[in-house]
Image (cartoon, helix red, strand yellow):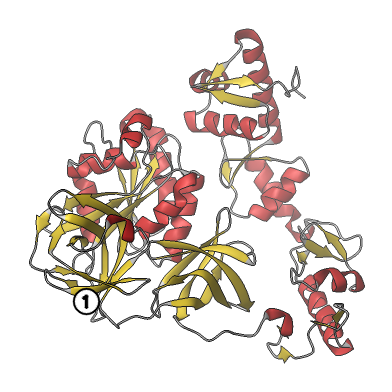
Amino acid sequence: MPLTVGTAGHIDHGKTWLVRALTGKDTDRLPEEQARGISIDLGYAPLDLPDGRRLSLVDVPGHERFVRTMVAGATGIDLFLLVIDAGEGARPQTHEHLAILELLGVDRGVIAVTKADAVEPDELALALEEARELVPGSEVIAVSAKTGLGLDELRAALARAAVEGEPGDAPTRLYVDRVFSLHGIGTVATGTLWSGKIAPGDVLHADPGAREVRVRSVQVHDREVDVAGAGQRVAVALPGIERRDLDRGDVLVEPDAYGVSYRLDVEIEELAPIPARVLVHHGTATMLARVVRVGRFAQLRLDAPVVAARGDRVVLRAGTTVGGGRVIDAAPPRHAEPERFERSARGEVLIHAPVRDSAGEWAFSDNWFDELRAEYERRLDVADPLDPGVPAPTQAWAAAVVPRLGLEQRGAKLYRPGAAGSLGAREREAAELEARLGFEPVKVEDAGLARFLEQQGRLVRVGDGYAVSAAAYDRARAALFEEIGASGRVTLARFRDLLGVSRKTAQLLLERFDADRVTRRIGDARVLRRSAPSRPK
């Protein structure tokens, strides 16, 4: 069965350069991409493996503005090629791309630590170890697109990860990710063939809309083929249909094999609180939806039709990726509104949940309210001592009900009156952590503990999940002000030398100063912001 591999990773970590080194093909085809030096749209290339197999490779943009495009490219891939800059380590889009891959069920792949020629050996060793911790079980290869270091090892690792499954017998389904016109050929659509086969002469439907199209020719990586199979990157020539009549998000399917629906029932995996309105990514399509939650399940009510099947994956975003899910019903009936029922801690339906009376006021039974209050008391009993609050309800009735619970609402959480965070039995753990802290960042697995200790002034968080001592941060800040006061600016290399630390440590500290709005970056240097104090604290 042919396989497709997709890149993932933060902007400027070298995905496109690595693809060019591996395949000989530049996937940045747009003039704007070449002028700006960043990927904006999806790119494609064939990747030949040492064992003679050929993978289809999808290169995705790494900028946070193009996550929608990244998801479109990641749907339908079989394995990932995660790219991490040896000098920078994992960055925000590294983590979001990994979360998206997990939500899509893509759990096989290889990590390439790029620009290995540009860092010192000890820094490279640290970057490799951090990459192994990030995705346990995946091979990690140090590479350089500039020198060719590690490219053969990377191809071999991809060959080991590219375990082929049995092709399914589902009807043909190809989600369109690109449409263009060629002189003498007409409209051409490309995409990853999710299931089935496509051959010249096939008659398919372009959905939504059930427009009949006939396939004139089929290409796989610029070569005409008699038939294309599931898992391959496919380009199909479609005479008789205008370029403007197809777009990314449309799907070519076997006639009458799939339905079109405005609703999906999904089993939810939540990364962050999922709001009532989200962007739903399915296949190569994106549409708004209203979320009707019932526990770990939800009905997505879409503002545009979708062609889906049971078992498909969706990604949900609201500014950032908040979750995803597996489709359990691709054409469900309309379920009851959540205001009409709630579930207790034991799972039973409480039929007397709030409803609006004739005057538009919320009405609810005493039994329902007592059950709600008891449930919040149970949640508070097991809340984290570091932050002894629980998420407040967000339903429409919350404003009318919460004031009667006898709890304090602080932001998005409810607390018992006067409750405050404390270390309790974790004081010894906190003291042991503090004893390890200095200039070199220490990994802190418990984000809640790190946040609490930072609020107490006992450490300073840097990067993603790391911390330095408060004293080290203050010394670094003093050195920063002294250097900028003398020279007007400070570079990463100069700051590293001033502190006598690694490049990565200096970079994490500078990024924290940026986040604290002490400095701002201009080119390869930092200067003080106008709002920054004239001398350190």
Residue 145 in which image quadrant: top left
Query: Whole-percent x and y of residue 484?
Result: 63, 14
Q: Which residue is farthest top?
A: 486
Left or right: residue 267 versus residue 184 is right
Q: Which residue corresponds to the image point at 31% horizontal and 31% vertical from the top-left?
A: 117
Q: Is residue 9 left or right of residue 397?
A: left
Q: Quadrant of the N terminus?
A: bottom left
Residue under the image location 53 percent in, 30 percent down: 507
Amino acid type of the residue that numbered disc 1 sits on in the rendered structure: Glu
Q: Is residue 142 above or below residue 342?
A: above
Image coords of residue 160 (percent x, y): 22, 60
- Please name whichever residue, 82 or 432, is drawn nearer the observer in this view of the structure: 82
Which residue bears the numbered disc 1?
166
Is residue 388 in sight in this rendering? no
Lateral position of residue 91 relative to residue 200, left or right:
right
Residue at image position (18%, 62%) is 239
Helix, strand or loop at label 1? It is: loop
Q: Position of residue 335 (x, y in %)?
A: 60, 85
Count neighbours of disc 1 (C-alpha within 10 A) and say few if under 14, some if 14 to 19, many if 20 or more. Answer: few
Q: Quadrant of the C terminus?
A: top right
Q: How many numbered marks have been drawn onto this rendered protein structure? A: 1
Question: Which of the 4 image quadrants contains residue 215?
Answer: bottom left
Residue 221 visible in the displayed image = yes
Residue found 45% across the figure and 54% down from its top = 68
Q: Position of residue 243 (x, y in %)?
A: 28, 56
Residue 226 lies, with reference to residue 321, above or below; the image says below
Q: Nearer the viewer, residue 410 or 61?
A: 61
**In the picture shown, does residue 398 fall above or below 522?**
below
